[in-house]
Image (tube, helix red, strand yellow):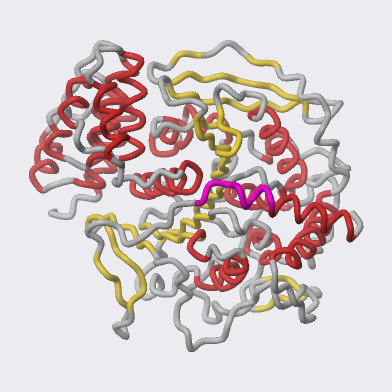
Amino acid sequence: MNRVAALAAGILWLLSAAHAAEPIRYEKPTGAENFRDEMGRFVSWKTGMTTNYLKVYPPNYTGEQARPAGYCPLTTDREFNSRSAKTPAEWEKVRAQIRKQVTSYFGDVPDLKLPLDAIEDPEADKGDYVLKEVAIAFNDEFRGKMVLVIPKGMPTPAPAILLYDAWGGGIQRATEGVYSRALAIHMARQGFVVVAMPHWNKIFGKRRDLCTMGATVHFTRRAINYLLTKKQLVHPDQIAILGHVYGAEIAQFAAAMDDRIAAVVASCSWLGPTRPYSSAYWDPPFWADGRAMGSIIQCVERASPEMYQSRRRVNYRPLPFLTQELLSLIPPRPYLAINHLMGAGRSATADTSLRECLIPVYNLYKRPWAMELIEHRWGTNEPVNARDFTTDFLLRAMCGIRPGHAGAAVVKEVLADLRSGDKAKQLRAARKAAWWRIKEGKADFSKMVGSADAPVRRAGIKALERTGDMNALFKHVAHKDPVVRMTVIEAMQLYGTEETFEILAENEMDRDRWTKEAKWQTLQVNPWE
């Protein structure tokens, strides 16, 4: 792309971004405590139970102001030459060049405009959601599949999530695996259309003309093309991407290369400077001229080589771009980084080098608060409280919904539909109530849990769970529907009381495998033992 074309593309992008819905700015969580380091300095907010808390970092937090500033692509290129981009238009020229470098690393990327030639399998009814397997053309030679998880009764067009799970389980792990890892099902029950994507090492590891990451990003973009044809189901401006562990690397690569992705969630990523406990955690963590500078690019060092090479041998020491340069393509879109606490004395530093890299770019677009950072205590798992925060983040970022702050008109509409006697209206109202955390309908939600209709009762218990009323929830802990029981047990990880933990511990083990595991995990976080 020449300079004129790059500038024109940048101007068009800016014009489209200017009309996008402004994300809701987040703030101190209700009931959160201030977390301070050993020196007594404020670090983050701490919310949740003692044994199962989240650390939520305030907007624009960059850690100790006295230490050296981190690397930022706004001011320095990969060869350590000074770079000056003082306006969004100037930065767009740099973005175009970085994308060109990333594409050169990918290899021979197929034409994105090739016909999708989609083949859709019949829907598989799972009670409160359906599964639909879809195969689309990767290029003119072969196809790739994905699985849509579509919750019943949600307001449409709905927000959607492209989901890349961890390690290699891919679609099966996200949709049918053990309870704690079936992230696609959990997020669908929050009211999102979820697209479980195939994992990189199962599909794209044998190509000679295209490295695995390049192929995976291309297929992600093809999946977006497909979603944009489903105008009655998916909102075209509300397509997010969520990745966990290696899936987080894919999510960030894909978001960097496609501005149609409205929001990004990277959970347990090793792509950027995510080792804050390094003795030199503020150093630029990248490969440059074959030298390791401070902490290295962890994704390249840790991941299987075929994630980056496949049968196309590429030189990844150095890469033709820096990790920070890649991530700097994500702003100004909302970006949530989810990390896990690594032990005593380490949590106070957080992922500050990542923020120092990206916040100046967000500042350029006057959106420093669009980047959010949380930490949890569950290792490489995706715990209930992190999933709950992710839901609120995506609702704020894509839908303009500020959970817990529904206006009078919204509450009135929801309550009217809940009490209409129409199951379809009740179901949609419960989905909206869950999004907004509407507490005024608690009695109505409890009635819905008694419905003979699975989607209605499961949407009702989810709406009730989002109110945070553990006393109202625990009345349903022995419900005949295992999904209702599981939702109540999971809620205890967010709102549990000493009495509820004692009652749960005395109950017999549940025969349903997901509910059984939910109980086992919940009892582990009991702060009163």
Residue furthest to the bottom in view is 66
Q: Residue at x 43, y 57 (%)?
A: 25
Q: Residue at x 39, y 70 (%)?
A: 347
Q: Residue at x 30, y 35 (%)?
A: 409
Res 499 quadrant in image: top left
Task: Looking at the picture, tell me which residue is in the foreground, 499 or 304.
Answer: 499
Q: Horizontal and vertical percent for residue 237?
A: 59, 39
Q: Residue at x 87, y 54 (%)?
A: 5
Q: Horizontal and vertical percent for residue 87?
A: 70, 69
Task: Looking at the picture, tell me which residue is in the foreground, 264 or 475.
Answer: 264
Task: Looking at the picture, tell me which residue is in the foreground, 132 or 331.
Answer: 331
Quarter of the image where the N terminus is located: bottom right
Decide whether residue 196 is among the magenta residues: no
156 vs 85, left or right, is left
Magenta region: 15-22
Q: Is residue 483 above or below residue 345?
A: above
Q: Is residue 30 above or below residue 436?
A: below
167 vs 215, left or right, is left
Q: Is residue 237 above or below residue 356?
A: above
- Whether residue 405 is visible here, answered yes or no, is yes
283 vs 479, left or right, is right
Residue furthest to the right in view is 2
Q: Horizontal and vertical percent for residue 134?
A: 64, 21
Res 327 quadrant in image: bottom right
